[in-house]
Image (cartoon, grey):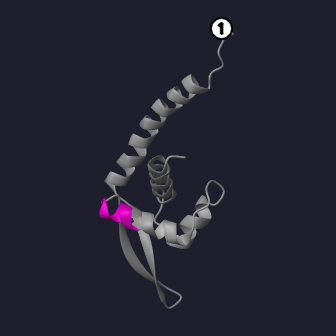
Amino acid sequence: MDIQLKRGILDVCVLAAIKSKDSYGYRIIKDLKPYIELSESTLYTILKRLETAKMLTVHTVEHDGRLRKYYHITGEGIKRIEDFKEEWKEIMLIYKFVAKEDDTNE
């Protein structure tokens, strides 16, 4: 898969994982596991990129005597998910064109 396309898909997957409620790294990996395998190092690179792009914010909460970073989606992050859904419609049309069988038997 094209690296840029995969990168964009992973970004949107991470945003979707925190769309309904704030979450932290381990929980995000666990939530995504049925759909996509993601290492911790890849996840934290994505989270940093999304934070820089203002698609999420970070806040720290003490949990069992340790600090845990929680990630919260912003309006920009929600917009990115919506844009992705629109872009995916176009990708699916292209896929259907490329994958269709030749009905003319040439």
Q: Is residue 23 visible?
A: no
- The question of residue 50 being in magenta is answered with yes
Prevailing secondary structure class for the magenta stretch in the rendered image: helix
Q: Residue 103 at x, y = what percent?
A: 66, 11
Q: Residue at x 38, y 68 (%)?
A: 48
In this rendering, is residue 87 above or below 69?
Answer: above
Q: Quadrant of residue 83?
A: top left
Q: Residue at x 48, y 51 (%)?
A: 3
Please state which of residues 15 and 75 is positioned toward the viewer in this rendering: 15
Q: Residue 38 at x, y = what percent?
A: 57, 63
Point out the image quarter for the C terminus: top right
Q: Residue furthest front?
A: 106
Identified by mark 1, the residue type is Thr
Q: Quadrant of residue 33?
A: bottom right
Please state which of residues 105 and 49 is positioned toward the viewer in this rendering: 105
Q: Is residue 81 visible?
A: yes
Q: Residues within 10 Å of mark 1 (few under 14, many from 20)?
A: few
Please state which of residues 12 and 75 is positioned toward the viewer in this rendering: 12
Q: Residue at x 43, y 76 (%)?
A: 69
Q: Secondary structure at mark 1?
A: loop
Q: Residue at x 50, y 66 (%)?
A: 42
Q: How many marks?
A: 1
The residue range painted magenta reads 48-53
Q: Residue 35 at x, y = what percent?
A: 63, 53
Residue beneath disc 1:
104
Q: Residue furthest right?
A: 105
